[in-house]
Image (tube, rainbow, N blue to C red):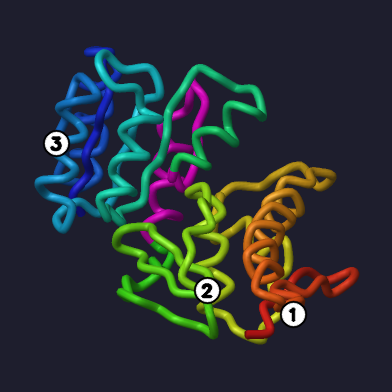
């Protein structure tokens, strides 16, 4: 398994490299955002997972992750940061990270999170996936609704992709969190509901302009959401 570590703290980077190599991983390192970005783009088919620090010289971890996803990098990303507010976690995950680990961390927990990410099936890349009047391209993270760009955020795009790959199936909030965020939200969090609401508003808004009032995402009370197709 190949791991890309993007971390500007030399002590942390060296410790991660030594520890991961002792566990059998092949490790490449970068000490700034620009270098990490290029390494990920140049070898996106070779890395199995990336460990990405939030605060980096040059480009931040958030910027690097966004650019990776925009350019089609599909490897899982574990973000490390001293920031521990829920809004910061959401920002990192919305940028395309798959999991989040606050500093300081225990190495054994980092290993466990890496194993979980590597076990998780990745969504297959399918160009031009079309359902009805909606078309998405996972490689470019672009979407069209009735021929118009709905201006989706990255997380809204990934949510739409999840629905399109599960037509007619009820997705629980837990299903959605597991596929899009990869960590346990507080049970009272309404983050999933907010993202579904925003996605529904953008798609239905474009449909209504064309006289189509069909509900695009159904709410199944007490269970979750369903995209009827």
- Numbered mark located on residue 214 in the image: 1
Query: Magenta span covers which residues?
Result: 96-118
> SS class of the residue under badge 3?
helix
Relative height, residue 107 to residue 26 (above, below):
above
Tell me the residue that label 2 is attached to. Answer: 146
Left or right, residue 21 beside residue 82 = left
Q: Is 165 drawn above or below residue 200 in the view shown?
A: below
- Quadrant of the drawing holding the N terminus: bottom left
What is the C-alpha distance between the residues marked 1 and 3?
43 Å
Q: From the image, tell me which residue sits under label 3.
A: 38
Q: Is residue 145 above or below residue 74?
A: below
Marked residue nearer the N-terminal end (2 or 1): 2
Q: Residue furthest front?
A: 210
- Measured as percent of width and height from the top left, residue 85 is found at 65, 23
Asked if residue 161 lies in the magenta stretch, the reply is no
Pinpoint residue 226: horizontal percent, then vertical percent. Answer: 71, 76
Residue found farthest to the left:
42
**Tag 3: Cα neighbours inside 10 Å, few (<14), some, or many (≥20)?**
some
Q: Position of residue 84 (x, y in %)?
A: 60, 22
Mark 1 / mark 3, whichever is N-terminal:
3
Determine which quarter of the picture holds residue 168: bottom right
- Mark 2, secondary structure of its residue: loop
């Amino acid at each position: 398994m190949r791991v890309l570590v993007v971390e500007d703290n030399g002590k942390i980077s060296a410790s991660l490299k030594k520890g991961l190599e002792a566990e059998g991983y092949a490790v490449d390192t970068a000490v700034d955002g620009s270098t990490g970005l290029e390494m990920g783009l140049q070898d996106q088919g070779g890395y199995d997972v990336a460990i990405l620090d939030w605060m980096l010289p040059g480009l931040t971890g958030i910027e690097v992750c966004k650019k990776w996803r925009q350019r089609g990098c599909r490897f899982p990303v574990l973000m490390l940061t001293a920031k521990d507010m829920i809004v910061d976690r959401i920002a990192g995950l919305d940028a395309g990270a798959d999991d989040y680990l606050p500093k300081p961390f225990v190495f054994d927990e980092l290993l466990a999170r890496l194993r979980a990410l590597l076990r998780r099936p990745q969504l297959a890349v399918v160009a031009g996936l079309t359902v009805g009047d909606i078309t998405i391209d996972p490689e470019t993270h672009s979407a069209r609704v009735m021929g118009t760009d709905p201006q989706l955020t990255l997380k809204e795009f990934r949510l739409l992709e999840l629905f399109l790959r599960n037509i007619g199936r009820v997705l629980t909030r837990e299903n959605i969190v597991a596929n899009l965020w990869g960590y346990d939200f507080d049970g009272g969090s309404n983050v999933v509901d907010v993202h579904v609401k925003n996605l529904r508003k953008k798609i239905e808004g474009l449909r209504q302009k064309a006289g189509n009032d069909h509900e695009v995402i159904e709410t199944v009370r007490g269970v979750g959401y369903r995209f009827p197709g």
